[in-house]
Image (cartoon, rainbow, N blue to C red):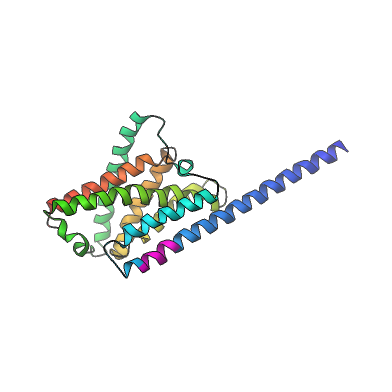
Amino acid sequence: MPDSATGSSGGASDDSTAVDGKHARRDAAVDCAVVIAFLVVFFIIVFCVTERYAGPITASCAVVLTTFLLRRRGMRWRDVGLRRPSRLRRLLVQVPVVTVTWLAVSAGATILIEKFLPKPDTSVRFGDLAGNLPATLWWIAIAWLIGGFSEEMIFRGFLLRRLEVLLPRGTGRTVTAVFLQAVLFGAMHAYNRGLFGFLALGAVGAVLGTFYIVFGRNLWPVILAHGLGNTLGFIARYLGPG
């Protein structure tokens, strides 16, 4: 009888774990589907009103949505990486490493893709930044708020983590999650850059996702690197022809 009872208890525990895992994957699938659908549909709606600010507005609203979804699952942003790094001095090393790697990969991907696809013209959106300090500072502020914070929270903090839960357990689960969120990141930047932007920004998303994992799933290194990289890009536009 004791052996039978023990066996029954073990089986019940296994069943409970399996059910919990199934529910977690279902919840993750719903969360991912809701956020992706929102990013696409809401962006299209806003794009019809303002092409220039469709991305920033959509990302800002998506942060509100993902915050709600996290709270619904009993989590907060600190649970997915928006927490103080254990060692601030380490952050001073991590941020430059991420930034330099991102810029190097971005430059390399651009050079490679240019051999097959024409580089998109973004002068319609940013052509007025050359020599225009107020406009440049405005977009740098947006770059930190949206690129630095919002996009990292959405794609690395939320989608990457939820994709990990959704995917089957195994050694390749995290790698696949990093790849999928990079694909989504590239896709959401393709509206004014086409296939070129999809590939180039997808590579950037892969870099940021990888460092997010490597640095202990802490968002601060990628947030700061993302904001810094975008700032350098806008400074280049300010100093350049547009």
Q: Is residue 62 visible?
A: yes
- Name the residue rendered at 50%, 49% in the picture: 70
Magenta stretch containing residue 39, yes or no?
yes
Answer left or right for 120 relative to 65. Answer: left
Chief secondary structure of the magenta portion: helix
Quadrant for the C terminus in the image:
bottom left
Q: Position of residue 16 (x, y in %)?
A: 70, 47
Magenta stretch containing residue 51, yes or no?
no
* Residue range (magenta): 38-45
Which of the 4 image quarters holds residue 215? top left
- Name the residue rendered at 29%, 46% in the picture: 227
Q: Is residue 167 visible?
A: no
Numbered label tally:
0
- Name the residue rendered at 54%, 57% in the picture: 29
- Name the residue rendered at 75%, 45% in the picture: 12
Answer left or right for 224 relative to 238. Answer: right
